[in-house]
Amino acid sequence: MLFHTGADLSIRTAMTDPTPHPLAEATAPDLDLIDTLARSALASVPPAFAAAAQGIVLRVEDFASDAMLEALEIEDAFALTGLYDGIPLTEKSVMDQPNGPDVIWLFRRAILDEWVARGDVGLGDLVTHVLVHELAHHLGWSDDDIARIDRWWE
């Protein structure tokens, strides 16, 4: 049986490292950091798309809700990094009654899981990728349309 005692803490406390690793005190990226990265990406959308991006509400949660997962027939919450919830601009009509704002959802834990699994991309780049993918849905692009120009998985 293995267990830790108070002596373990005193030994660790007594250890000194003249050059600690910069990430030694780092904590896991939280909701606020993912939100900050996403808002930075949204602010840097090219001018041709900036007006369309203005009306989007950005939400960051740890996971998609059970209702979202059920509606999409997704069993594993880690499989959904983002979701566009709204009516694409190509389908909107002036006759539509608003049901609420269009929302881009980003799911922190699923994004972090993909980030760790990939190991070859910065967190900011991944958050930007997910955000742009969902913004493309807002613009009316299908997953196939997006895949033709965004070969992210390669």
Image (cartoon, rainbow, N blue to C red):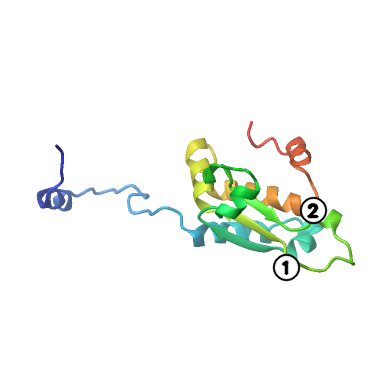
Q: What residue type is labelled 1?
A: Gly
> Residue 33: percent from the left, percent from the top?
50, 59
Residue at image x 37%, y 53%?
26
Q: Position of residue 106 (x, y in %)?
A: 59, 54
- Residue at the image position 57 percent from the left and 57 percent from the top: 37
Q: Kindly identify the residue that appears in the image at 33 percent across and 50 percent down.
A: 24
Q: Tag 1: Cα neighbours inside 10 Å, few (<14), some, or many (≥20)? A: few
Closer to us: 68 or 37? 68
Q: Horizontal and vertical percent for residue 132?
A: 69, 50
Mark 1 or mark 2, which is nearer to you?
Answer: 1
Label 2: how many Cα within 10 Å (few below 14, some 14–19, many 20+): some
Taking 52 as reference, is 74 above or below it? above
SS for callout 2:
loop
Classify 94 as above or below 148.
Answer: below
At horizontal 19% and vertical 50% (from top left) the residue drawn is 16
Q: Which mark is residue 100?
A: 1
The residue identified by callout 2 is 139
Q: Is residue 128 visible?
A: no
The residue lying furthest to the left in this view is 7
